[in-house]
Image: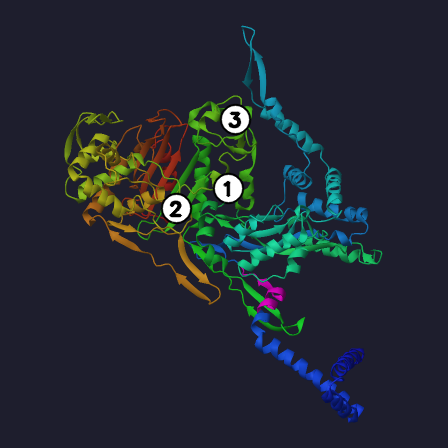
Amino acid sequence: MKFLWKIKWLLERKLKKLNSNIRGSHIGVSLEKSIKKIPKEIRILIFFGFLLGVIFIRLFQLQIVQADDYSQILAGQHFRQSTLEAERGNIFLTDSSGNERKLTENVDLYNIFVDPKFIEDEERFVEILSPILYKHFCELNGLEEPSDKECIRNIENFTENEILPQEESEDFFVEMELDDGEEEEEQVFLDQDMLDDETQDVIDDFTKEDGIDYIQEKLSEMVQGGVRDRNYFGFFENDELLNDMESIGDFVEISGNYIYFIPEKVDNLNRNAQQIFQVFEKHNYSYMLETIRNSLTEREIRYVKVTNDVNSRIAREINELKEKYFSERVDGVPLLHGLGTEEHKERYYPYGDFMSHVIGYGNDQGDFLYGVEEYFDDILAGEDGRIASHSVPWIGAIGSAEMQVEEATHGSDVYLTINPTIQENIEAIVRDYYEELEPDSISTLVMDPHTGEVKGAVNYPSFDPNNYSDYYQIELLSYDQRYIIDEDQYMDIPVLIRDPETDDIRMATFDERTDPNLEKFVFSEKLGPQTFIDRNISYPSEPGSTFKNFTVAIGRDLDEISLSDTYKDEGELEIGPYTIRNVMDQCSGELSFLDALNWSCNVGMVRIAQQIGRYAFYSYLDKLGFGQRTGIELAKEDPGTVTGLEDFSMARYFNNSFGQGLLTTPIQMGTAFSSLVNGGYVVQPTVLDKIYDRENNEIIENDKTIKNRVFSEETAERMLKSQGEIMDMEDEEHLGSMVGIPFYSVGGKSGTSQIAFRGSYQAGEGWTYGGFVGVVTSEDPRYIIVTQVRRPRQSQRGSGSAGFINRDVSKFLIEYAGLER
């Protein structure tokens, strides 16, 4: 009623003003007299009719004429959107009995947060919550039970306190007095055993009460509240907008695709808001100036994340505590009203480091890296849905006129060709030889030469994808690790320094590694993030003598040689300014090309290369897939390097013939070697068995692909037979006597490639790659085995490192497959 009377009052005022304007004229006098003759009630109705007409015209203008303009403005101001999260597909294996093994899980974890505004009794609040946090850090951390040391590390990370002994850098150098009285600074190393003893003493003495005390101190700081250092404004994918915003001033902070405002650095609220408004307007974003101005002003802290990835059991206990203390109130507010949890999905790998290089991992930012997780990310991830709505333009934000719902498309499941039994046994074999051979790393690959299916793929050291961040942790170089910088053969082990100019930790150059005046760090896990590299597909190296199989096969296929043909081997061969020499003493005199293959005679391979010619040689290498990615369904595959005819050198060509001067990966070697034992065909290597599309309840089988025929059937049969003949040749230093698999015709070829350093190949332990490519069996070729040992330090020969691994893997495969004798 007040509203209507107010309108009547305004209309009467307007009418009186109108009367005063027209009163002076003759027409006005007559009009005034005419109006006075109209009854008062009729005049009021006329006024209201006039009012309704004005309102109608205005509504017509807003709803019809300017509807689109106002809709766009209002959509920007009142648009609301929430995400319907898609569930990520899982990765499976199937064993020989058809039983499935689920390698991934999508688990529900929770973040704990507090709203300081609703915490009225801080001391009581902290007292109740701290034991729960201790349980999370020390009893059930996510999905794992932490060790005593991990418990303390978790509390250290939360509280930013140093509890365990630290490796102080001041003790890293001492001054030594020389005979002539001068002093110099000499590098010394920490005594790791002493440090370990001190650490264990602290762990033994650390109690639950100690942990809760540390937690309470930190938690008291977190619940204090106050104002935000920066205000979140939004996520934007427009790079041009982000660049323009970054140049406005230091009160704008860009982090990735996120825009934040820093109120403390705002020097003129209206001017700064106008600057931001103009940038958004330039890029067609509709924001009210007032909205931007509000985002530039200080805001009270209403959300403080206490900790991440809390187990559902602990989250449930928090909810139970809130119920328990609901009736305990301060100024009418429940004691724990400011405490909450928020759910999120976390990728979990229940088998830890089992085939981790094939699987890959997901990080805290929601990115999936390496292996199947990265390669099939789009298929596994699915597509998030959304619920979107905005307010009605002519009413305002008092109701939703429309709602758009796009359902989430859940990710598909990926099934792999890996045989879990084969994988487990190879991992155990490789793990044992890693301790024995002391290499940098070992990789072993098992393939089906007929289908290209990978049945086992092992890298060691391996990693636990649940704890991927452990591989970024660094520590000071200790006394026990001094060999890493003292001996050049360990140069592939990462060493870090603190940059003298920026104070940042970075990788050391070779000269910096040996500089005694620089503080050195190493990764807690020896290879650090390099551990994630799948060396079966991403770490090419010279194949050495294993490559000689292909040179012989090409010569045989072109009918340029027969394996029984002989040549004169004088032990070395001069090619221009270069001399090519054999390594084995047996490579001398009248030899057959089978002898040359068996004894890895470099000169014999050069003789074949001279006969077949460079064009035919590199044409075969191209058809075999060298210098190209195989297309296996694993992320970050490296194509290797074959210079070929592009930058031709006769010396390099001859070196290529015996496996030097080109780089290959184990997956390339396995794929190419399959053509020597399956009748001459190059197959497509694959780890994918099938994909299960959960949305459509459809199974998509992976059709195994044969690419093309490279070798004739006769050549392939002869090369397969030769593998067994090589292994049968007796010599106590050769692999044949070490196989120890009587009555079976296993086949294969070892290879040793030297590592170049500062322009020349090096000799000695730690300066070779030991390789082996084998077939089980040469009578019934079921499996190809490719093994590479990088820098073995207990054997310089491929036969004495990779060869032993091949022997044990072959024994297992024969027993597992039940191959007939």
Q: CA distance from mark 2 to mark 3?
A: 32 Å
State whether residue 366 appears in this view.
no
Amino acid type, label 1 = Phe
Q: CA distance from mark 3 to mark 1?
A: 21 Å
Q: Are marks 3 and 1 in contact (CB under 8 Å)?
A: no
- Residue at image mark 2: 637
Residue at point 63%, 62% (across, down): 288
Q: How far across and how far down the image is residue 761, in percent?
A: 33, 27
Above or below 488: residue 316: below
- Residue at image mark 1: 463
Amino acid type, label 2 = Glu
Of the pair 445 and 162, the residue shown nearer to us: 162
Above or below 335: residue 195: above
Read off the magenta span: 72-87
Give left or right: position of 583 versus 175. Answer: left
- Residue at image mark 3: 481
Residue 654 in which image quadrant: top left
Tell which residue pokes out farthest to the top in this image.
180
